[in-house]
Image (spheres, rainbow, N blue to C red):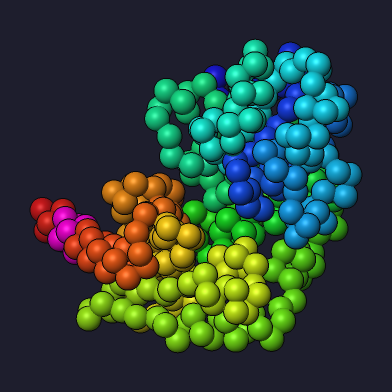
């Protein structure tokens, strides 16, 4: 049974459907759940999106029908409502949707993950997971089309935004012809690239430009210039009054450097440091992130490490540079055979 057959079988027999995504959701998880919810409603299903927290203001334009509610509101309004199917987008682990949502999910008779992140084969075989997709939004769009549902603009804008964000504006090597063919379907509904881009990235204040300049000025590289990194401290965020969400793309500026193989951004989060990794696709930073206790894709990954900024930065750069050199040596060995 392929993922399209599995999706149809799961949704056919369900009437009351709850859709959720991971905590601190990004546009991929949010866009996917909104579009899937609207599609299920087109089929006459009682579908609703429930997340651990309420939708952030910056994403509300993606949800004009208010299909997303918080767990707290769900427990108030729908506590006694039976769930036939619980769908989770953009992750394949219940641990990532929040303890409260996990308790709700475990009470549902059927659970389905819709995702594009790596996972054990046993999980992949019983869910709708395709690691070849550029974004969960791409997979969600294809699943919706597979049911013969006509995409509406209300479905298309969240899906376009999901793919736009998770591919860094179509820059990652996971983008394929199929990705762009789906984008064509989404644009046919009236979604335009300038509108979608401006709505999610927004216009910026001068303070944003000054913070970006400050962060880029902190850029450093290893001697061979194969690894480059930025630092973002809590003091800087407070000084410039910038939302953390607006800084996520800062790391992508490093990818234009000559000789770059691995880009890193270190961001202070209290007693922890978030280590974001990017590559142009030649180097598998997902493997590197897992070695640091995190995870992700081969071109985009992250880990959270306890410690001071200086200590984490020093040890992490050293580890990743060593791993990079080992990867390159292994590739050279394979090519010489």
Question: Relative to residue 218, is residue 180 drawn left or right?
Answer: right
Measured as percent of width and height from the top left, residue 115 is found at: 56, 38
Q: Residue at x 55, y 26 (%)?
A: 127
Q: Is residue 87 above or below residue 244?
A: above
Q: Residue at x 46, y 65 (%)?
A: 268
Q: Quadrant location of the N terminus? A: top right
Q: Splitting the image into 4 quarters, where does residue 263 fall?
A: bottom left
From where the camera sits, is residue 38 visible? yes
Q: Residue at x 75, y 39 (%)?
A: 70
From where the camera sits, is residue 321 visible? no
Measured as percent of width and height from the top left, residue 57 is found at: 78, 57
Confirm whether the magenta stretch covers residue 327: yes
Question: Relative to residue 274, is residue 153 drawn left or right?
Answer: right
Q: Is residue 56 above or below residue 16?
A: below
Q: Is residue 295 above or below residue 92?
A: below
Measured as percent of width and height from the top left, residue 192 is found at: 79, 64
- Residue 280 or 25: which is nearer the viewer? 25
Question: Relative to residue 286, is residue 116 drawn left or right?
Answer: right
Q: Residue at x 49, y 76 (%)?
A: 253
Question: Magenta segment range?
Answer: 325-332
Q: Main secondary structure of the magenta part?
A: helix
Q: Splitting the image into 4 quarters, where does residue 176 fall?
A: bottom right
Measured as percent of width and height from the top left, residue 177 is found at: 57, 54
Q: Splitting the image into 4 quarters, where does residue 249 fall?
A: bottom right
Confirm whether the magenta stretch covers residue 212: no
How many numbered discs sit on the rendered protein?
0
Question: Relative to residue 53, is residue 169 drawn left or right?
Answer: left
Q: Is residue 331 above or below residue 140?
A: below
């Amino acid at each position: 049974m392929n993922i399209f057959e599995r999706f149809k079988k799961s949704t056919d027999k369900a009437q009351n459907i709850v859709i959720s995504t991971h905590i601190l959701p990004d546009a991929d998880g949010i866009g996917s759940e909104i579009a899937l919810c609207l599609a299920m409603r087109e089929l006459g299903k009682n579908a609703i999106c429930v997340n651990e927290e309420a939708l952030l203001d910056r994403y509300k334009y993606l949800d004009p029908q208010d299909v997303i509610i918080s767990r707290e509101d769900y427990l108030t309004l729908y506590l006694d409502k039976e769930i036939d199917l619980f769908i989770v987008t953009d992750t394949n682990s219940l641990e990532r949707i929040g303890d409260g949502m996990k308790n709700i999910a475990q009470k549902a008779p059927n659970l389905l993950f819709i995702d594009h992140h790596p996972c054990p084969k046993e999980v992949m075989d019983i869910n709708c997971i395709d690691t070849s997709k550029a974004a969960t939004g791409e997979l969600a769009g294809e699943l919706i089309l597979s049911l013969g549902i006509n995409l509406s603009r209300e479905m298309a804008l969240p899906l376009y935004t999901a793919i736009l964000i998770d591919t860094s504006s179509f820059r990652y090597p996971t983008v394929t012809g199929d990705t762009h063919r789906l984008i064509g379907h989404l644009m046919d509904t009236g979604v335009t690239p300038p509108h979608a881009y401006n709505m999610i990235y927004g216009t910026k204040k001068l303070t944003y430009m000054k913070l970006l300049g400050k962060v880029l000025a902190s850029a450093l590289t290893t001697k061979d210039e194969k690894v480059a990194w930025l630092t973002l401290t809590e003091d800087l965020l407070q000084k410039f009054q910038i939302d953390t969400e607006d800084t996520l793309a800062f790391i992508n500026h490093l990818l234009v450097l000559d000789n770059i193989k691995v880009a890193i951004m270190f961001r202070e989060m209290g007693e922890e440091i978030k280590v974001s990794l990017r590559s142009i696709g030649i180097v598998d930073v997902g493997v590197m992130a897992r070695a640091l206790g995190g995870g992700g894709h081969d071109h985009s990954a992250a880990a959270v490490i306890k410690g001071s900024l200086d200590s984490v930065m020093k040890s992490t750069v050293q580890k990743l540079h060593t791993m990079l050199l080992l990867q390159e040596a292994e590739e050279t060995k394979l090519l010489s055979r």
